[in-house]
Amino acid sequence: MAWNTDRTKALLLTAATEEFSDKGLAGARVDRIAAAAGVNKERIYQYFGKKDELFDAVLAAELVRVMSEVPIEGHGAASIGEYAGKLFDRHTKDGALARLLFWEGLERGRNTVDRATRADHCATKVDQMLAVLPGIDRTDAADLVLTIVTLCDGWTVLPQIDALLAGSAPDRLDRRRAFIVRTATLVADALLEEARLEKTPLEDSRS
């Protein structure tokens, strides 16, 4: 029977995603990943290389998946609130990307592999933000994306802090989601108003 390379790679990526998101890069073990995938560990080295390179492949796949599943689209501040809510829902359903990014930051700091591709992905998100909130500054758009991502990621990776600060009422998840949506909407609205006020004097001076 012919070996199904694509299926094997998919099995390894799935197992590696769980292992890395749970234990980080340093704590993950290739043996456990191979066992969970039901594959000889030599296939990992054959298809992905070293453990670091497998981690990179996992992170890249998760980034692409979430970017495609949760785009920034629409028009106006309310659309940014909707985006924040959808991203929160995505991370609540599957928090692997949030945990992977935190592990990357803890273990690698500012050192990221495939920086050019990652930078392009980030630029795309900022471009989407600018399309939804026309007129705002690009740096503000980047800060707003980062703020939303940080708020949504924090729910997944800092459950103990949330419990200490806000308790564990049955409606806690709904309340946190609503707060993040409201925060994103208010900030977006404030940025649009700021852009409008900056534009008005220029129009007045021309009239």
Image (tube, grey):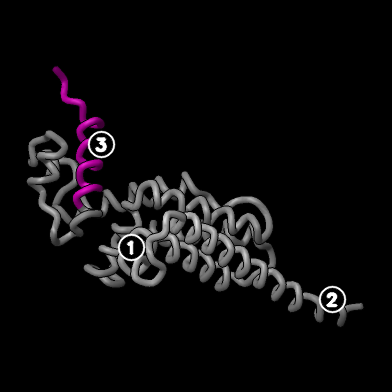
Instruction: Tell me the distance, in whole angstroms, between the alpha carbons under discs 3 and 2.
Output: 56 Å
Query: Could you tell which of marks 3 and 2 lies nearer the N-terminus?
Result: 3
Q: Which mark is residue 191?
A: none
Task: Tell me if 17 is positioned left or right of 115 in this view.
Answer: left
Given the current orientation, which residue lies at the most extreme front position?
169
Instruction: Tell me the distance, in whole angstroms, between the alpha carbons under discs 1 and 2.
Output: 49 Å
- Dots 3 and 1: beta carbons under 8 Å? no
Above-or-below relation of 186 to 89: below
The secondary element bearing badge 1 is classed as helix
- Decide if residue 54 is in sight here: yes
Q: Which residue is disc 2 drawn over? A: 203
Q: Which residue is disc 1 drawn over? A: 159
Q: Which residue is disc 3 drawn over? A: 10
The secondary element bearing badge 2 is classed as helix
Q: Residue at x 45, y 65 (%)?
A: 151
The amino acid at mark 3 is Ala
- Magenta-colored span: 1-19
Query: Could you tell which of marks 1 and 2 lies nearer the N-terminus?
Result: 1
Quarter of the picture holding the C terminus: bottom right
